[in-house]
Amino acid sequence: MFRKVSLLAAAAALCFFPLFLLGGLGRFDFWWWMSAAVAAVAGLGFALDKSYAKILADDWKAGRPEKILLGTLTAVLLYAAFAGLNYLSRLIFASAGADIGRVYAFKEGASPARVGLLIMFLIGPGEEIIWRGFIQRHWQKRWGFPAGWLLAAALYAAVHAGSGNAMLVLAAAAAGLFWGFLYHRFGSVLLNAVSHTLWDLLIFVIFPLTS
């Protein structure tokens, strides 16, 4: 199984790094390509780990209201932390405003409704299935905690390096560590998916940190 998960991690890197480098391709913008990449890598994960569909189904059945509530609370907490860091970084680093603006440039030409729907139904849940449900889960089985957690978070941050945007890479590292620890603590992709999806919606659609 370790070789299969290594293949999945390589596929994730090959799909996501160029996406952040290019921002889109041809007639399709970043959000369409991100959705396609998430669907492709998650589909590969299910093909390689045929037991995972049952794990997800069991996760959905057990303690669903509590997981949704905790996922919501952690999303709000993480958003508040990022809002504070956004303010401080703009005061401390001269390039922070430009780097943050480049993150939001991914939204150019995309309607908020489309971005929100893709985040809600594919990107947010799909990323958690890939990074925590497949990669971190198996890497922690092999190397334990904290090694598996740190390696998964490092790879999650590294694929964002294709953007050449220091603020985006730092944000991905912080969020990856946060969601990775959340997964280690509770072992629920449902909880993580709620947290990740709601945070994405807050950051990109509802209350973007543009100033």
Image (cartoon, rainbow, N blue to C red):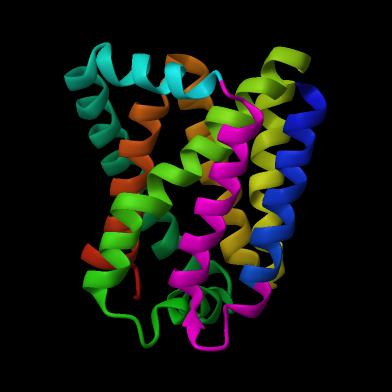
Q: Which residues are magenta?
A: 21-50
Where, quadrant-wise, is the C terminus in this rendering? bottom left
Give the residue at x 52% y 26%. 181
Is-magenta flag for residue 209?
A: no
Image coordinates for residue 162, horizontal then vertical, percent: 71, 68
Q: Nearer the viewer, residue 151 or 95?
A: 151
Front-most of 9 and 161?
9
Q: Quadrant of residue 49?
A: top right
Residue drawn 55% across and 18% down?
51
41 part of magenta stretch: yes
Q: Is residue 177 visible?
A: yes
Taking depth in this image into account, of 46 and 106 the one nearest to the observer is 46
- Residue at 65% x, 66% y is 166
Name the one closer to the observer, 77 or 71: 71
**Which quarter of the picture shows residue 192?**
top left
Name above or below for residue 3 compared with residue 19: above
